[in-house]
Every structure is written in structure tokens, then in C-alpha cells.
Image (spheres, grey):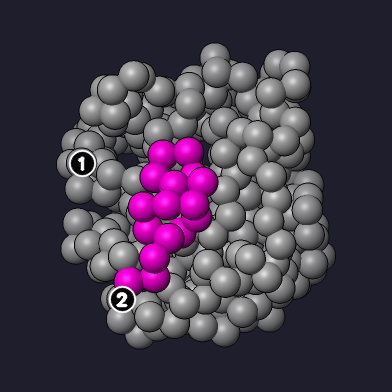
């Protein structure tokens, strides 16, 4: 099942509501914009709608291909927030950004109610951190808008991650679970051309298992969907100094690209754009 080392990323055309993104020729960068007061790396920094707007514009200028806006933290131990509170944080930002960006907006949510409102306001992608395990009807909402849907593998919930034991054979388990998520999405009316999968680094996995997932990323290729990876500033990469964590993130991003990631979700777009360009050159230099 494991691909040869010289496997080239398969080319996909990811269909969204208004865009079609070519995946595989180069790594697509998804820039993270948290509008929460409690995110693990930048909580509160962009909770003001004007600051969030300015940051989204900056991320596009730095080279982001997609902006991913999150209004509810999924850091370890975080508590869930109501739809009303998530709406209060998110909607003013989406209203300011409507028709102001040249790149698609993704919204990081597992709530169908939030997804519907976000798609109404111009978002084109729903990035479901729960992989349809919290609200399965979210897939139908995305399908109704011809939106993109990212299925992220989550084990347990943020409240229980600290108590979970290690996963036996993580990549095999993740592959089976993602396959089941894809089936649920298709039964809800989602076309595979609109879907992307994410193995969910840090989402209920032990520190050493995240490195193993990146190393064996190619084993998800039989799912026949583009792969997104989000290592940026995750706890398994954390160092006391933020600059050191940025370098650790760069190493993880490089490894993910070399192992077949089509999209990387990152906070530091300018720096990771430079990283991705070199990693892409290495991928292109492999013999056919």
C-alpha cells in the first residue's frame, strides 16, 4: 500500500462555489486567521473585526492561496462555544471581507448553522475539524452550496485528548476513518471533486505519532483525494521560543510536501511560502 519514494503528487481539480483550484503542481498555502480570544498561538490578536480584515488582506499579499477563518478554538482542553457566540465572532469579519479578496475563504467550523451563514456571505470552503462526527448534516449544507469540504480526522474531543491513549497503527486507523467520512459525505450529496482530506495532526494523537503520520502520508493516497496537512505551531513542534517553533514548523511542512501533501495550513505564510517553493522544486526534480 505504501507508494514508492519517487511517487509524484497526483493532479486534482478542487471544485468550489466560484473557483477551481489546481492541486498537485505546487503546494497550495492556506493561511490561518483565528478570530477567537483563546486560540493556542494567537488568541485574541485578531478578535477585532478591523484587525482581522487587515490580517486577511496581509495574508493574501504574503502569498496565501486560501484564507481559513476560525471562530472557535479546537486547542487541547478547549470547551465548545455556542453557535450564537461563534456567529458573533465570525459574521462581522465575513461581512467586511465579502468581495474584497481575490482568493477563496474557508471557514473552520463543525456547525451546519454556521456553515450555511458563512457560505451565504461568500465563503467557499468548510473546514470541518470533526470530520462530520459532530454534525453529519454539515455535508449536506456544503453540498447545497457547491462548496469545498475539508474532512479533518479528529479522535475524541479537545476536552478528552489529554486522557486518550496512543492509537494503534495511526495511519491505518486514520485511513479507515477518513474513508468512512468520505462515504458519509457522498451519501449526503457531496461530490468527491469538492472534497479534501486532512489526517488531523494533533487532534487526539500523541506527540510521536504526528511525526509517523507525516512520514507515512502517502498511505492515504488510495482514498484518491487531495491531502491537506496542518502542522503549523502544533504542540508536538513547540519550542520555548516562537522563532524556534517556526523553524520546527518549516521542517514539518517540508516533510509533508515531500510525502505528498497538496495543501499546507500555516500561520506564517510569508516564511512557509519560501519553504514550499524549495520543497516543490525537490518534488519536481524526482525521476518519473
Q: Mark number for residue 16?
A: none
Q: Taking the image as drawn, is residue 221 in sight?
A: yes
Q: Residue at x 51, y 46 (%)?
A: 38
Q: Position of residue 87 (x, y in %)?
A: 60, 71
Q: In the drawing, what numbered circle is on residue 101?
A: 2
Q: Which residue is mark 1?
A: 271
Does residue 186 show up? Answer: no
Residue at screen point 50% across, 55% down? 36
User: Is 26 on the left or on the right of 256, as rendered?
Assistant: left
Number of disc labels: 2
State the quadrant of the C terminus. Answer: top left
- Cα separation between marks 2 and 1: 21 Å
Instruction: Indicate whether 25 appears above or below 66.
Output: above
Query: Is residue 126 shown above or below 199?
Result: below
Magenta span: helix, strand or loop, mainly? loop
Question: Could you tell me which quadrant the N terminus lies in?
Answer: top right
Secondary element at image label 1: helix
Indicate the secondary structure of the residue bearing disc 2: loop
Q: Within 10 angstroms of label 2, few (less than 14), some, or many (20 or more) residues?
A: some
Q: Which residues are magenta?
A: 35-50
Name the foreground residue: 219 vs 50: 50
Amino acid at each position: 500500500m505504501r507508494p514508492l519514494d519517487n511517487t509524484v503528487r497526483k493532479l486534482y481539480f478542487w471544485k468550489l462555489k466560484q473557483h477551481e483550484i489546481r492541486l498537485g503542481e505546487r503546494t497550495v498555502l492556506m493561511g490561518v486567521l483565528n478570530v477567537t480570544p483563546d486560540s493556542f498561538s494567537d488568541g485574541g490578536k485578531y478578535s477585532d473585526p478591523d484587525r482581522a480584515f487587515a490580517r486577511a488582506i496581509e495574508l493574501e499579499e504574503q502569498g496565501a492561496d486560501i484564507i481559513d477563518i476560525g471562530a472557535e478554538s479546537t486547542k487541547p482542553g478547549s470547551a465548545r462555544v455556542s453557535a450564537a457566540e461563534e456567529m458573533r465572532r465570525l459574521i462581522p469579519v465575513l461581512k467586511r471581507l465579502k468581495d474584497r479578496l481575490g482568493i477563496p475563504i474557508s471557514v473552520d467550523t463543525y456547525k451546519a448553522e454556521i456553515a450555511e451563514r458563512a457560505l451565504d456571505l461568500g465563503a467557499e470552503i468548510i473546514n470541518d475539524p470533526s470530520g462530520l462526527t459532530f454534525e453529519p448534516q454539515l455535508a449536506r449544507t456544503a453540498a447545497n452550496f457547491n462548496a469545498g469540504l475539508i474532512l479533518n480526522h479528529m479522535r475524541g474531543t479537545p476536552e478528552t485528548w489529554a486522557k486518550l491513549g496512543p492509537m494503534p497503527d495511526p495511519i491505518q486507523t486514520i485511513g479507515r476513518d477518513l474513508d468512512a467520512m468520505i462515504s458519509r459525505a457522498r451519501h449526503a450529496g457531496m461530490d468527491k471533486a469538492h472534497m479534501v482530506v486532512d489526517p488531523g495532526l494533533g487532534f487526539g494523537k500523541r506527540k510521536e505519532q504526528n511525526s509517523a503520520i507525516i512520514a507515512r502520508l502517502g498511505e492515504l493516497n488510495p482514498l484518491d483525494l487531495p491531502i491537506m496537512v496542518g502542522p503549523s505551531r502544533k504542540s508536538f513542534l513547540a519550542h520555548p521560543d516562537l522563532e524556534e517553533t517556526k523553524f520546527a514548523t518549516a521542517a514539518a511542512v517540508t516533510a509533508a510536501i515531500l510525502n505528498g501533501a497538496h495543501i499546507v495550513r500555516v500561520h506564517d505564510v510569508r516564511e512557509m511560502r519560501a519553504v514550499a517553493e524549495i520543497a516543490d522544486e525537490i518534488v519536481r526534480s524526482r525521476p518519473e
